[in-house]
Image: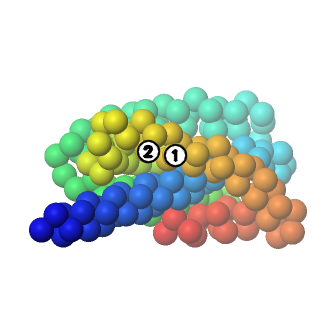
């Protein structure tokens, strides 16, 4: 009997690490999709003939306001419904809008696409922390959250460096397409 209990605990622990790995990967994609625009700022400005002010507002305060505005109601929704579905829907939304950023023909279309990225990304963090809380005991939770947060830094690097490398070979629009597809 105790052997079966131990196997079940090991299975659950293994699945908890799988869930953490998926959240880390999604957080990495989340930040890569956010930071690709930062890394390609000059190319985007040149293409659309827009100002530093326009781009600065779009990737800074506008993104932050949209993200914050949607994050709280989405977090409340996650408290009452299926968090995995919310995270999955958010990933598809932010990824589709990242792809649309690369397909945008005007600065207005690009702005709408980046706003869509912010809305989709707002569906990730609170539900992910809540989900991880189900799989990790309080004494292990801080470690799980710290591991997931590697996605922030590696995602920034991937978005900035990876996006720039793709753009150097195939144009900045292709960087958005390539980085947007994995989240879908």
Tell me if 52 is positioned left or right of 60 in this view: right
Outermost residue on the left side: it is 1
Outermost residue on the front side: it is 2
Q: Verify CB contact (< 8 Å) between mark 1 and mark 2.
A: yes
- The crowd level at tag 1 (other Cα within 10 Å; few <14, some 14-19, many 20+) is some
The reply to whether residue 36 is in sight is no
Q: Nearer the viewer, residue 158 or 52?
A: 158
Tell me if 69 is positioned left or right of 164 in this view: left
Q: Which residue is mark 2?
A: 144
- Write the residue at 24% across / 39% down: 76
Disc 1 on helix, strand or loop?
helix
- Write the residue at 30% across / 51% down: 135
- Write the residue at 56% across / 68% down: 182
Q: Which residue is mark 1?
A: 147
Measured along the vertical axis of the image, is residue 51 above or below residue 89? Answer: above
Q: Nearer the viewer, residue 9 or 109?
A: 9
Q: Position of residue 102 (x, y in %)?
A: 67, 62
Tell me if 66 is positioned left or right of 99 in this view: left
Q: Nearer the viewer, residue 64 or 128?
A: 128
Q: Position of residue 2 (x, y in %)?
A: 16, 64
Q: Position of residue 54 (x, y in %)?
A: 69, 35
């Amino acid at each position: 009997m105790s052997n079966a209990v131990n196997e079940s605990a090991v299975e659950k622990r293994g699945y908890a690490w799988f869930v953490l790995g998926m959240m880390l990967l999604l957080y990495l994609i989340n930040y890569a999709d956010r930071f690709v625009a930062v890394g390609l700022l000059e190319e985007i400005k040149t293409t659309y003939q827009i100002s530093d002010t326009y781009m600065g507002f779009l990737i800074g305060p506008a993104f932050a306001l949209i993200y914050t505005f949607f994050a709280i109601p989405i977090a409340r929704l996650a408290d009452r419904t299926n968090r995995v579905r919310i995270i999955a829907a958010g990933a598809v939304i932010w990824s589709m809008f990242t792809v649309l950023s690369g397909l945008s023909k005007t600065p207005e279309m690009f702005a709408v696409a980046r706003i869509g990225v912010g809305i989709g990304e707002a569906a990730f963090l609170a539900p992910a922390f809540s989900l991880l809380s189900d799989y990790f005991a309080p004494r292990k939770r801080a470690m799980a959250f710290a591991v997931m947060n590697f996605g922030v830094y590696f995602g920034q690097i991937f978005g900035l460096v990876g996006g720039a490398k793709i753009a150097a070979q195939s144009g900045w629009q292709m960087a958005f397409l390539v980085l947007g597809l994995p989240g879908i």
